C-alpha cells in the first residue's frame, strides 16, 4: 500500500536529529562536512531504531517511478530505497533537492522499519507530500523524514557557525527549504538557554520583591528576663531598659542589682 503519509511512532525533532547523527556515525560520516548521498549505493546495511538491517539504495528507471522522486519499501529481506535515474543524475550534479531526496528515503529506512515491514511503501512525491490534518507532526512519517534528511546532511559543528539558511544550504548542498527548517530549529535550541536564564532572573527578582523584609534595626536583647512577662526581651533605651514584649521600662541596674 502507498499513501502520502503515515502515522508512525512519536518522535520529537530532537530525537530524530539524534538518530540522524547516529546513522552518520555508523556510516563513518560523523565528521564529514559535505556528505555524498550516492555513497549509499555501496552500503549493504544501515543502523535503524530497531537495530542494524540489510539495506540497498536502488536506482530504477524513470518509468518505474514516473511521478515520485523516491520510494522506500521492504522487499522481504532488506530495506530498499528506490530513486529514479533522473534523481540520481541530479544528485550527481549536486542538486540540493535530489541529494536531500535520497537521504529523506534513508530517513524512512532508519526510523520506520516496522511500518515498512508491515507493507507500507513510503514515497517522496515530486510535488510534495500531503499530510492529513489529523496526523500531528511528531507522529508524521514525512515530517520525521524531512527533519532526518537535513540533520544527516548537515555537519552541526560547522553549520552552527553560519548566520543564515542560505549559507547552510550552500555548505551542506541541500535545498533552501530544508536548510530553513534546520536553521530555524537550531536557532530555537540556541535561544532556549537564554530564555531560561531570563525566566530564572525574573523569578529571582520577584522573590526579592515579595520576600519579607528584615527589620533595619534588629534589637540585641540582654540575658536577663523581664520580671513582668518573663521573656528575654530586655534592651537598653538611653539610661534605662525596656521590654520589647510588654513595653515595661526599668531603671538602669545599680551595682549589679536585678531589674526592679
Image (cartoon, rainbow, N blue to C red):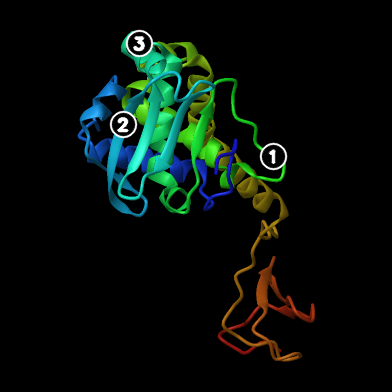
Name, please, the residue furthest toward the top: 93
* Residue 176 drawn above or below residue 140: above
Callout 3 touching callout 1 (CB < 8 Å):
no
Where's residue 203, x and y in %? 64, 48
In primary-sequence order, the first of circles 3 and 1 is 3
Res. 238 image quadrant: bottom right
**Image quadrant containing the N terminus:** top right
Cα separation between marks 2 and 1: 28 Å
- Residue behind mark 1: 132
Residue 47 shown left or right of residue 69 in the figure: left
For the image shown, how many numbered marks are present on the structure?
A: 3
Where's residue 188, x and y in %? 54, 32
Q: Residue at x 57, y 84 (%)?
A: 255
Callout 2 touching callout 1 (CB < 8 Å):
no
Name, please, the residue furthest toward the right: 247
Checking the image for residue 51, the label placed there is none
Checking the image for residue 94, the label placed there is 3
Q: Residue at x 72, y 54 (%)?
A: 210
In primary-sequence order, the first of circles 2 and 1 is 2
Q: Residue at x 32, y 22 (%)?
A: 158
Amino acid at each position: 500500500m502507498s499513501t502520502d503519509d503515515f502515522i508512525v511512532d512519536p518522535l520529537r525533532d530532537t530525537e530524530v536529529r539524534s538518530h540522524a547523527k547516529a546513522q552518520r556515525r555508523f556510516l563513518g560520516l560523523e565528521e564529514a562536512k559535505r556528505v555524498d548521498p550516492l555513497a549509499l549505493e555501496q552500503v549493504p546495511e544501515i543502523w535503524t531504531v530497531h537495530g542494524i538491517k540489510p539495506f540497498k539504495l536502488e536506482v530504477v528507471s524513470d518509468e518505474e517511478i514516473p511521478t515520485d522522486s523516491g520510494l522506500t519499501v521492504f522487499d522481504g529481506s532488506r530495506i530498499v530505497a528506490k530513486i529514479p535515474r533522473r534523481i540520481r543524475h541530479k544528485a550527481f550534479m549536486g542538486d540540493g533537492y535530489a541529494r536531500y531526496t535520497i537521504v529523506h528515503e534513508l530517513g524512512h529506512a532508519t526510523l520506520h522499519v516496522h511500518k515498512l515491514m508491515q507493507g507500507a511503501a513510503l514515497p517522496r512525491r515530486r510535488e510534495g507530500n500531503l499530510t492529513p490534518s489529523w496526523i500531528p507532526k511528531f507522529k508524521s512519517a514525512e515530517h520525521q523524514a524531512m527533519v532526518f534528511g537535513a540533520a544527516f546532511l548537515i555537519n552541526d559543528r560547522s553549520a552552527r557557525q553560519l548566520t543564515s539558511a542560505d549559507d547552510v544550504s550552500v555548505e551542506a548542498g541541500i535545498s533552501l527549504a530544508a536548510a530553513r527548517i534546520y536553521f530555524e530549529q537550531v536557532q530555537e535550541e540556541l535561544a532556549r538557554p537564554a530564555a531560561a536564564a531570563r525566566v530564572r532572573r525574573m523569578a529571582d527578582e520577584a522573590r526579592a520583591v515579595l520576600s519579607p523584609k528584615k527589620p533595619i534595626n534588629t534589637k540585641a536583647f540582654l540575658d536577663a528576663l523581664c520580671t513582668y512577662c518573663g521573656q528575654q526581651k530586655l534592651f537598653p533605651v538611653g539610661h534605662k531598659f525596656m521590654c520589647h514584649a510588654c513595653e515595661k521600662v526599668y531603671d538602669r541596674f545599680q551595682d549589679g542589682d536585678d531589674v526592679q
